[in-house]
Amino acid sequence: MTQTLLPDTAWSGGHLLLGDPEAVDKVRRKVLSASVAASTLKCPAAMAASRLLPRNEDPFSDAEIGTAMHAVFEDLYALPAPERTHEKIDELVNSAGSQKWALEKLEKQTKDALRANDANRRNWIEQISSLCHGIFEIEDPRSVIVIGIEATLFVTVRDIPSICKIDRIDWVPCTPDAVGAVTLEQLRNRHSLLVSEIDDLPEVADGDKEAWKAKRNLEDRRDWFETTIATVEASGEHSGKIAIRDYKKSNDPKKLKTPNPMYSDDYGDQQRLYAFGIETYTGIRPAMATLYFPALGKVREINLSAPEMDKMLLGYSGAWKLMNDSADRAKFETRPSKVCAWCELVNSCPSAHPATRAAPGTPEERMDRFQLTARRQYGAVELGIPTLRPGAAAAEARTSEAPREDSVDVDTPMVFANAAEPESATDAVETPELEQPAEPIPAQGDDLFPITLGDPSTSTGTPDAGTPVVSAPGDEVPPAPGMCAETAREPNQGGSVTEQNIRVRAEAAPQQELIGFDLNLNSWSAIALAGIVSQSFKHMDEQNIPVSREAWAHFNNVLGGIVLRAQAQLTGQATWQAGAQTRIRGLLAARLERRPFPFKRPVGEIEKWMADTEKFLIVGMTELIDLHGRDLLQNDSHNYFAAAVQQ
């Protein structure tokens, strides 16, 4: 039997099932970190796989190069300040390169092997050296007061056991009255309180692990204060700010920008978690957090305001819950995105392929890029993850059969395997036969489009009785270009609405608008669009306009266009994710109630109504903004509406 990397696993309905309880226990972290929280929210299935698959040992991978850069900086900033020079960086990098590419690590010391090893060593040293020297574009290491290097803090964040691994903590001199300033006297006072607290602890009984851990934590905090106090005293700068510094290997200038607040900010949230951890650990809130990009010679300052901290904590708590809920069910959701090509599961995951539509370039360019990257990952047969019917139980993963080498082209990723083209849709999708055909509700004039209702008596009693069973990811009948699978059938070609929506849609946090190229039904955009759709139906019904699917869609276009155009004039952007359009839709509802849409009137009247409505929305929003700046506690505006006094 072929040995696979992920035995006792299976795909089912957009989820990765783990049939081995030991694997589930390994995936479920007892202590959460910022990186695990971020990867869980991005894709629970990828997070689980990264925990179970063997580590990539490529010395030139981004992770390995980044780790080497961190190690050099750790050694550099541990030195006395005057010794942190360019020459010392060269010395540290060359030493690390000699250890990394030591000759004794070679299996055979042939001429070709020695030549290749030397070339790799020089290439590796060149990459690390270039990165590390970039730190001088950001700061002069000789002027930095370091109070923490590779600090590891174990703290509790919102009842979540957490670990913070912080690259560097600095003491930035400032005046004692500066915002966020800490004085040497304050550090000494906190140290004294910790010493007293430790002295007052009762003697820890043998075997009392919790009491021992609590005491050890207090002692670690005491030691941190002692080291920090000594460093600050030696610097002569007796007042300063606590600053977090975090090194990033990326050379992408886009990483320097603050992300759109509608989307996640993994880098920023990581630093906010560190700031929260330091405050929990020491009682002192850091005044600043900065991302260092040595490859770019630039930095990004992180916003540590209370609203941003609260948002981070909300997402962090959500990641902890998502991880544990997924582990409880042994079922981990896939969340496709444009970074799927870099995932270790890409060549097996049934959800990965469509995500390429979110990437830039032509379809052919996207596919070429995707295939090139995917070929560097594990193959489908190597992973060994079979596909079960949607809704399968995790236990079925233990008895499922892994993909066979004779059924999949080993050299071709599964998502691109040349599966035989089915002669018809029934060859690809098997649907259980019903005893009696479902009858559609007849349309009342042009008022409703048909909706098929199944006969309850025909149910088999199992949750998956009516769910089509797909034999393999490569066997699905593709939808027409530009169409999602659930909308491939034209509404007027018969069939039911339920048949058009058979694909299970994943959900994510509301700030994430898309999952791959699909609308996240839990997003703010979905909430806004639902408001437009319901408002248009309500208004058409109130005006006695027959609500056909076609008419409904056209009126949705009318109202949606008005809202977005007004929003663009007010804010410079037209997006359903923004909060402004929610207020605009509230004004639109009032307008529709008092000034109904002129159905069945000449085009000129309709266009005038639309222009007047857009103007009304803009004026209404402007009044809202102006109202915010007025003194409303003391005003006499009621006199404006009083009857004129006759003389």
Image (cartoon, helix red, strand yellow):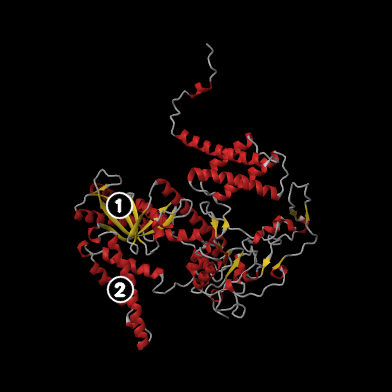
Residue 65: x percent and y percent? 37, 70
Query: In the rendering, at what x and y percent does residue 312 appear?
Result: 44, 52
Numbered label attached to residue 453: none
Characterize the local packing of mark 2: few (<14), some (14-19) or many (20 or more) Cα atoms within 10 angstroms: some
Residue at 39% x, 73% y: name it: 60
| Above-or-below relation of 436 to 568 | below
Nearer-the-camera pick, 171 or 252: 252
Type of amino acid at the residue the image marks with label 1: Ile
Q: Residue at x 39, y 74 (%)?
A: 59
Say if 168 sits above or below 119 in the image.
Answer: above
Left-right relation of 21 to 597:
left
In the structure shown, which secondary structural element does the residue marked by tag 1 occupy? strand
Task: Give, as a three-letter code, the residue at label 2.
Answer: Ala
**Along the polypeptide, which appears first: circle 1 or circle 2?**
2
List the residue tagged with mark 1.
242
Residue 3's x, y, as percent? Answer: 54, 78
The answer to which of 113 and 4 lies nearer the viewer is 113
Give the residue number, with chain letter if any, for mark 2.
Answer: 96
Query: Separation of disc 1 and disc 2 at Cα?
Result: 31 Å
| Identity of the residue drawn at 37% across and 67% down | 66
Classify 10 Å Cα crowding around label 1: few (below 14), some (14-19), many (20 and above). many
Left or right of 594, for residue 458: right
Q: Please tell me whether mark 2 sits on a helix, a strand or a loop.
A: helix
- In the current view of this chain or complex, which residue is farthest to the front? 604
Q: Which residue lies furthest to the top in this view?
A: 647
Considering the image in quadrants, where does the N terminus appear?
bottom right
Q: In this view, does 509 lie to the left or right of 278?
A: right
For the point 30% across and 66% down, which residue is it? 132
From the viewer's perspective, tell me whether residue 469 is left or right of residue 47.
Answer: right
Residue 227 position in % (x across, y down): 25, 57
